[in-house]
Each structure stands twice: as C-alpha cells, then as structure tokens.
Amino acid sequence: MIFEILTSAVMGGVFVATKFFESGGGNDAKKIQKICDNTGLYVKENGVKKSIRIHRKSKIEGGNEYVFQIPLGLSFKDFEVKKDVLQDGLNIKRFVFDVSLDDLKSLKLNKDILKQIQSLLEKKKRLNKEIDLSFDGMLKIQVYDEPLPTMFPLNESVFNKCKGWEVPIGTSRSEFITHDFEKVSHLIVAGATNTGKSNFIKMMITCLVHRKPDDVKLTIIDLKNGLSLGRFKDLRQTENFAINPEQAKEALKKVQEQMSKTMDYLFENGYEDVKEAGFKERHFVIIDEAADIADDKDCVEILEDIARRGRASGFYLVYATQYPTTQTVSSQVKRNCMGRLCFVVDSAIASNVVLDQSGAEDLPLIQGRAIYKTVKCKTVQVPYADNKFIQKTIQPQINIRSRGEKNEQSDSQGAENRKYTLILEETELS
Amino acid sequence: MNRAILKEQRIENILLSLKKLNYLSTSQIMILHDLKSKRNTSRVLQEMSEYLHHFRDGENIYYLSAKGRERVNCKKVCKKTPQARHYIMRNSIYIAFGSPDTWRNEIKLGVKEDRKTHIIADALFIKDGRYHIVEVDYTQKMITNKQKIEKYKKLIECGVFQQKPFFIWITTTEYRRRELQKLMEGLDCQIFMVSDFI
C-alpha cells in the first residue's frame, strides 16, 4: 500500500518536473539554448543541426553565469544582436515559486507544517532578470536575478570605499566602480538633459572635498549660470568660480599659468610628473555645460593645453556637456579624455560620439543610469547625492568670504582687494 | 620787445591749445585765452592766420595748418569735417570744468587680462582724486551708448577704480538727455546739453 502510494507520488513528481522543464522553467541554461534554437542561432553541418553547448555553469553574485561553446559559423555579434530576445525570453511571465533552500530549511516540523508550506507556495515573484554577454573564446552569459538598482543613495560609506584620488562612479551589478584620476586623468561626462550629469559632478566634488580637504583645488566653471554648482562657490578649495564665458576665460587663464609654473618646476628638478615629485595637491578643472565656451577660441586652446599637459602637472579636467560633438568638444580634448561617463542619449549616433560605440541609447530612462568607459564599458547606477547630504558634508569646508556687494567702506580700503589694474593708454586720436 | 615776446607767447599758447583740443571755436578761444571780446579774438586769430585754417559752423572753427603743426610739433592732422562738432562739444566740457591739467582726450581704459573690457573714453581727467570720464553723444546711436555704459559698468565691477568714476555726458537734445539718464542709473553722472554752453 505504502509502496504504491510512494511510486505513484514519485511518478507524478517526475511527470510534473518534465512538464516544468519542458516549458523552460527552472533552468536558464536550457532556456537560453531553446531561445537560440528558436531564433536561428544554430548552424547546419551536413544536415545535422549544431547549436550552442553548455560548457560550464557557475554562481556569481546576484545570479548565474553560463558559459557556452559557440558552433563554428556563428559569431559573438550574432548573439549580441539578439540580446533583448534572450533577456525577454528569460523573463516571460509565468508562475514562479520564489522558494529558496533557506526557506525549506526554515520549515519547522510541527502541527502547522501544512500552513507553512501553503504560505511558501503563495510566495511568487515577477521575473525581472537582466543579462550581460561577453566573449573570450566562449560565450559568457551572466544572468542576474535582480535588475540594477534604480536608486543608489550616497552616504559616507560610499566615499570610504575609495582610495587615493578615486571618486565613486556607481554600482554595477557585480561591483562598486570608481574612477581613479591618477590612472585616467580626464573625464568626459555626457548625456541628455536631466539624466544626472550635474548630480554626478556635485557628488564628485563632494567626494573630493570630503576625502582630500587639504589637497584638492577646484576650478569650477558652471555655465548653467551657477545654478547647480553655486553651492561650492565658497569652499576654501575653490580657487576659481565662473558662471559665464568671460569669467571662464579668466579662470582658465589662471589655471594655465599655474600649470606652466608647475611644469617649469618639475622640469628644473628633473621630475617626470607630480607623482614623482611627491606633490600632494591636485587641481580639478570642472566644467558643466561646457558647450557654451566651445566657440571661444582662447578657452578651447587652454582646454586643449590642460588636456595635453594636465596629467603630469596634476591638473585634471572634468568636462560635462550634453552632446560632445566636434562643435562642442575640440577633438584634441576628446582624444585626451580617456574616461567617459555617458548617461542616456537619444540615438546610437550620439552614443558613438561619446563612447565610440553604441549602447547608451538603450539605457533605460532612469536618472543616474550610465555607461562608464575606460577600456571596457560598464553599465552603472551613479550614486544620487541629495543636497542635504552635500551641504552637511561640505559645510566644514566653507569659508565665508565677503563677496557681497561692495559698499563705500570696502572701497576705501585701497588697492589690496583689487584684482585687476586699470590700464590707461593714449590712442592715435589723443 | 617785451610786448613782442608776450604776443609770440600768446600765439604759441593758442596753437598749443589747438594741438591739445584739435578744433576750437572763436568763443572757446576767447574764453580759454582770456581775450576779453569776440572782436579782439577775431583780430588775434586773423594775425596768426598763417598757422590756422578755419571753416564756419555758426562761428569760425579753427584748426592747425601745416605750418602751425610744425611750430608746435603736432602730429595729428585735422581737416574740415562735420565731426568737428564732436570736438567742439567736448571742449565745452573742458572749459566748463576749468581746463583741468590732467585732461586727456581719447583714452583707452581697460583691464590687461581681458580685451573685452577695453573701451575708449572721449576724455578723462582727475578731479579731487577721482576719475571723471567725459562722453560726447553727438549723432551716436543710443544702442552704442548703451553698450558703452555696459562696458563701464563691467569695468567698475572688476574693481579697478578705487572710487567709482564720475561720468560727464554732453548731448544734443532733451529727449536724449532723458534716455541717457535712464541708462546711467546707478552711476554718478552729470548730463549737459549743448545749449547749456551757448
């Protein structure tokens, strides 16, 4: 009797399981294989169908990695094109139990075991997997159970993960990504409006000021009329602050002079760069909405100079603009800015302009979602810095300089507070 | 003998003021050189006519001839031009402020670091340690005046002046005077009209 019940239970179980797996449930590797077969990602050799073969499956943080052998005659590109087919295939809505081994372990063998099992069965989930494809002789498909977080709040612990002159770029699915200005000294930040450029810059400045209050020097040029970066105007680290093209030119000229001095010093003492000389100070030239000064020849020349010679002398350029075409970024500057951070743009062409490859146009319209590229591209969620946190962090660094209206009394202080000297020249008409 | 020297001196002085101010009307020369009456002035100028040219614009407007330029070593060549009125207007200011020693015409002001702030004032002099800037508005477009004033404001913002400069305008009509008054809001200025000096 017991035997009969057991065997029928086992057979029933087997039947259900086959049904379950047939429909592609449970095992993503099999599912991927099926999707590839259905979308024509296979070759026929002497009438024999050859499709991808699973080679290895391993657990990674937040998901699984499947490694497939590609049959001869297919390329990685064929798979890359079908990325959305694969991803949506893995997410086709179905009844999925969200039961893990831990849940089973937590079952207590007592009277209401049935109730516990029932409540477990009620745990269902929406599938929302995301995949990454890469190729190193094998096709690697990383399947992540959870999508990238849409919000990555900034707090001090994020800053503490950085070393040296690193600033947080954001979190990818697998790791926390930083940008190291010592390795890649210039950065271009691009993306459509309201996608997170200015927020990234605010976060970056906050991080630098918080981590290196005594070593960092800032030149902030905010051509949004100072709206977004105005809060950093009174920092003791801020050496130059400009909100319009004229002021920007002044500021850049000062920076160039400083840079030349540093260069001369390094040369005289036979150092190769500031790292070798042991300089602790680094000067960041941060330009938001940089397109506004792109048609000013003098400004562009100085920028090119900084981009070319800045690394050795410790002057780092961060260049933010909506769309870095040749009209808005001189090609000299662009080629010298290896680091790229690209938020959502509207087309593959625009993405090509920023990253030299497409991809940024497919980013979801989530603020702070970006592609970070030094050598390889990584999709990241940039930390969101709310203004309260920024204010709290930079408050100790603000010194109140009287930059307000000059009244009669301050005028009579004489020449000390004058920045410029008046020149009077005779003209030919005099 | 003494009188002859004094006479030569007077001729020289008139030529020097013409060198400085380019064009002068009879009445202006009369006031500047204290020649007492129009008739006397005309006589004096007649005597030194080899050094002068003149044309009429209501009254005689004098300027240096080649010989006159030679005598006082003046390099600038003046010609008969309707532009002379501009000079005559400016001279009225020169006379009204008592011929300041520090008076200089057509002076370029600016900040070395920024070419965009460069601006040429019609005249400039220092009085009580304060720069006085003279601007003549004669057949000038209002928009040009506006741009000029903007530039001055920028210069002042740069903090190049220890004390805000004082502006003196001279213009032709009551309407233009009011317009300028509006534009000069926030700056110390005095606006004259040509009719004030006739």
Image (cartoon, coloured by chain):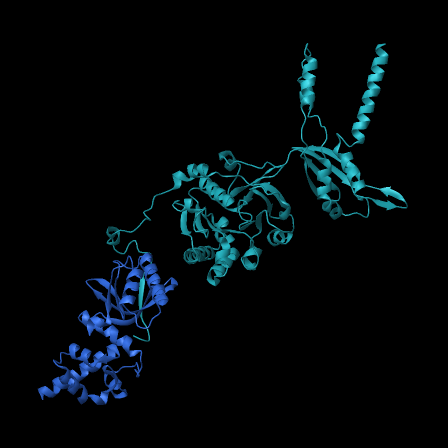
Q: Residue at x 86, y 45 (%)?
A: A44
Please state which of residues B142 and A62 is positioned toward the viewer in this rendering. Answer: B142
Q: Residue furthest right?
A: A46
Chain blue in the figure, letter: B
Q: Colour of chain A?
A: cyan
A80 relative position to B165: left or right: right
Q: Position of residue A216 (x, y in %)?
A: 44, 45
Quarter of the image with the C terminus of chain A in it: bottom left
Q: Residue furthest front?
A: B175
Q: Position of residue B41 (x, y in %)?
A: 15, 83
Q: Is residue A191 above or below residue A308?
A: above
A422 relative position to A13: left or right: left
A216 relative position to B160: left or right: right
For the image, the number of numbered tags is: 0
Q: Is residue A7 above or below residue A68?
A: above
Q: Residue at x 31, y 81 (%)?
A: B81
B188 relative position to A313: left or right: left
Q: Position of residue A259 (x, y in %)?
A: 45, 55
Kindly tell me whether residue A105 is visible in this rendering: yes
Q: Position of residue A332 (x, y in %)?
A: 55, 59
Kindly tell me whether residue B99 is visible in this rendering: no
Which of the 4 quarters of the picture holds residue A5?
top right
Q: Is residue B46 above or below residue B111?
A: below
Quarter of the image with the N terminus of chain A in it: top right
